[in-house]
Structures are given as structure tokens and as C-alpha cells.
Image: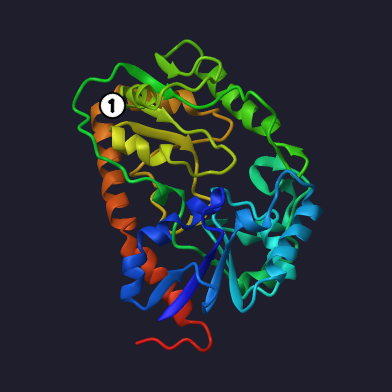
């Protein structure tokens, strides 16, 4: 039995990072892998929240992360479970640490893109000052976690035969009430304009469900408006994936969001048969929405049912277990049956 310690698994985003592993812990035991809080372990998983502090300048955050991992005894693996393809901070700690592997929920398919400078490493935010010039030197030890943010919810597939009231759901926080910073970069300067551009593009042409001034509402009211919308818009946030993506299929609505084809993740269920891909600047949005609404019943049936089927098949926790099993089976000194 291999014992893996999940460091600080209750801390902030470490909880969502490690949630799928704990959900599947009985299945992991069946293949000889056990998660533990004990200091008696074979390997340790170290989540992003333990080694990154985005409130600090990047270099200070890296120092903090290196100090944390320096106290770990034995072999450990850094697990970047954030919902974005950016490597900022975590790969910098990995580079200077003794970690044996780097696991991440999603990457850019083309690793050469990491060599270019993007705004805090987020390609969709455009040019910036963060890059990973030595990405190909690090690449051999970089692997997918085998899970992502769509694992963090357990959808209840609802009957969607009832007529829907709204054309479009834009039930997301906008405008942001307080500026959000990551390593001295104001993320709000990128986050809000993307949403403003969306709302300006939609204008008054459609019946849109939205929050008033971005103020949160009770969860049931929020879900009711999503359920009663023909289309659910999912703009890119601080990362590309969000629970809203699978909630669209849960509610029996068509998912429309910026193109995801540049991302590598496992599982990955975004294709022409599960959602409507649009350009990040929304320049083709009106055309795509009109196409959906003009043949709504057929489009919805195809996309929603395909999304539900692919989710059930791909997000079976047995797939995560075998993904991690394979990673460990390839490590030196690990015997498999």
C-alpha cells in the first residue's frame, strides 16, 4: 500500500484540489493507494494554497513556497489544482524545489506558448510580463492531475422539457465590487472588461437573466434563473473552466463560452457536440446565439444530451484512480501487481 499525505487539504483552494481524490479514496485503496494525515507516508501531495500567496509580490510568494517545501521530509509532488492554464508561482517553486513531479489540472496544449509573455501567464488576457522560458526543460516532470474543476460538483440531471423564460443567462458577478490582485497585477482590469464587452454585445436584443450590479442572490433563485434560460453564458474568469459549464447541462440549457480548444486537461469534454464555442472578444457571439435560438429544440437536445453522456463517462472516478495509478507505476521503486 502506497501512503500519500495530502498537505493542508482543508486550506482554501487545496480543498477543491484534493476533493476528487478524497471522494475516490475507497477506489484508490482497491489499487493500493491510501491518503493519510499521518506523518508516516511514502509520498506527499502539496497543493497550490500551501506554496503560493497571491497577495504578495511574486518573488516573495516563491520564497514563501520554497520555505514551506523545505520542511517536508521525503518525496513530494506539487499539485496545481487551479482552474487556469497559467503556471505563475507554482512552476517557479517547482523549478527550485526537490519535488519529484508537477501535477496540474490543465495546460496549454502548445507548451511553446508558455515561452511568450502573458498577463500573469493567462494567454486570454493578452501580452504581459510572465513567461516560462525553460518550459521544455521542466516538461518531462509535468503531468496532468487527471481531474479538474468539473469534478468539484455532483450534477443532478433535471428534466428540461418545460418552456424556458429567458433567452440567455448572464448570472455572473459583474461589476467586481473590490479590485482583485494577484502578485501586484490588478486582475479586475482584465476580468471586468471581458464581461462588459459581453453585456454590450448582447445589448437589448435578447431577454437576459442577470444580476443587478453584480449583487449575489439566494442560491435557489440563482439556480431557478439558470434553469429557466435557454442559453447559459460562461465567460472566462480567472481560469477557463467553471462549475457553470456543467451546470448548463444539469439545467438542460445550451452552454456558450469562449473557445476551449487550446487547452489540455483530463477529462476534457468540450467539443462541437457539447457546447457553442465563440471568440474571446465576442465578435461572433450574436451570429452564434441567433443560430442556436433559430433551431433551439434540436440544438439543445444534441448538446445537452452529449454533454451529460460525456460527463457521466469521463468523470467516473475510476478514471481518476487509474490515471494516478499509472503515474505512480512509472516511478522508480514502485512495484505494481
Tag 1 residue? 296
Q: Nearer the viewer, residue 203 or 266?
A: 266
Residue at 37 percent across and 68 percent down: it is 321
Between 240 and 72, which is closer to the camera in this rendering? 72
Residue at image coords 75%, 54%: 61
Q: Quadrant of residue 213?
A: top right
The quarter in which the C terminus is drawn is bottom left
**What SS does tag 1 mark?**
helix
- Asked if 140 appears above or below 294 in the picture, the reply is below
Q: Nearer the viewer, residue 294 or 253?
A: 253
**In this figure, what is the number of numbered marks?**
1
| Chosen colour scheme | rainbow
Task: Look at the image and tell me whether residue 82 can be seen.
Answer: no
**Residue 301: horizontal and vertical position, in percent?**
24, 35
Decide if residue 100 is on the left or right side of residue 241: right
Identify the image quadrant of the N terminus. bottom left
Q: Residue at x 55, y 28 (%)?
A: 283
Give the side of residue 202 with respect to residue 52, left or right.
Answer: left
Residue 207, percent from left and from top: 39, 13
Q: Is residue 106 visible?
A: yes
Q: Position of residue 97 (x, y in %)?
A: 71, 71
Residue 293, by quadrant, is: top left
Relative to 17, 182 lies left or right: right
Neighbour class for label 1 at 10 Å: few (<14), some, many (≥20)?
Answer: some
Query: Depth check: 315 or 114 in front?
Result: 315
Amino acid at each position: 500500500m502506497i501512503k500519500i499525505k495530502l498537505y493542508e487539504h482543508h486550506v482554501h483552494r487545496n480543498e477543491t484540489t484534493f476533493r476528487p481524490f478524497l471522494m475516490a479514496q475507497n477506489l484508490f485503496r482497491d489499487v493500493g493507494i491510501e491518503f493519510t494525515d499521518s506523518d508516516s507516508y511514502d509520498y506527499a501531495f502539496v497543493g497550490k494554497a500551501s506554496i503560493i500567496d497571491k497577495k504578495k509580490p511574486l518573488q516573495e510568494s516563491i520564497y514563501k513556497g520554497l520555505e514551506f517545501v523545505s520542511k517536508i521530509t521525503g518525496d513530494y509532488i506539487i499539485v496545481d489544482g487551479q482552474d487556469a492554464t497559467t503556471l505563475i508561482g507554482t512552476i517557479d517553486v517547482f523549478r527550485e524545489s526537490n519535488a519529484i513531479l508537477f501535477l496540474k489540472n490543465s495546460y496549454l496544449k502548445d507548451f511553446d506558448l508558455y515561452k511568450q509573455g502573458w498577463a500573469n501567464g493567462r494567454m486570454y488576457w493578452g501580452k504581459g510580463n510572465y513567461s516560462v522560458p525553460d518550459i521544455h526543460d521542466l516538461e518531462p516532470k509535468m503531468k496532468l492531475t487527471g481531474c479538474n474543476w468539473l469534478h468539484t460538483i455532483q450534477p443532478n440531471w433535471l428534466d428540461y422539457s418545460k418552456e424556458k423564460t429567458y433567452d440567455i443567462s448572464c448570472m455572473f458577478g459583474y461589476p467586481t465590487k473590490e479590485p482583485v490582485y494577484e502578485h501586484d497585477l490588478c486582475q479586475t482590469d482584465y476580468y471586468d472588461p471581458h464581461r462588459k464587452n459581453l453585456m454590450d454585445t448582447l445589448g437589448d436584443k435578447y431577454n437576459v437573466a442577470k444580476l443587478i450590479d453584480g449583487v449575489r442572490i439566494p442560491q435557489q433563485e440563482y439556480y431557478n434563473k439558470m434553469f429557466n434560460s435557454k442559453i447559459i453564458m460562461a465567460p472566462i474568469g480567472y481560469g477557463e473552466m467553471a462549475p457553470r459549464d456543467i451546470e448548463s447541462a444539469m439545467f438542460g440549457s445550451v452552454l456558450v463560452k469562449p473557445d476551449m480548444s487550446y487547452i489540455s486537461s483530463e477529462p476534457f469534454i468540450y467539443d462541437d457536440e457539447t457546447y457553442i464555442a465563440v471568440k474571446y472578444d465576442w465578435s461572433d457571439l450574436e451570429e452564434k446565439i441567433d443560430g442556436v435560438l433559430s433551431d433551439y429544440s434540436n440544438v439543445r437536445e444534441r448538446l445537452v444530451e452529449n454533454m451529460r453522456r460525456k460527463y457521466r463517462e469521463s468523470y467516473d472516478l475510476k478514471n481518476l484512480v487509474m490515471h494516478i495509478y499509472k503515474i505512480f507505476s512509472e516511478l522508480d521503486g514502485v512495484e505494481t501487481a
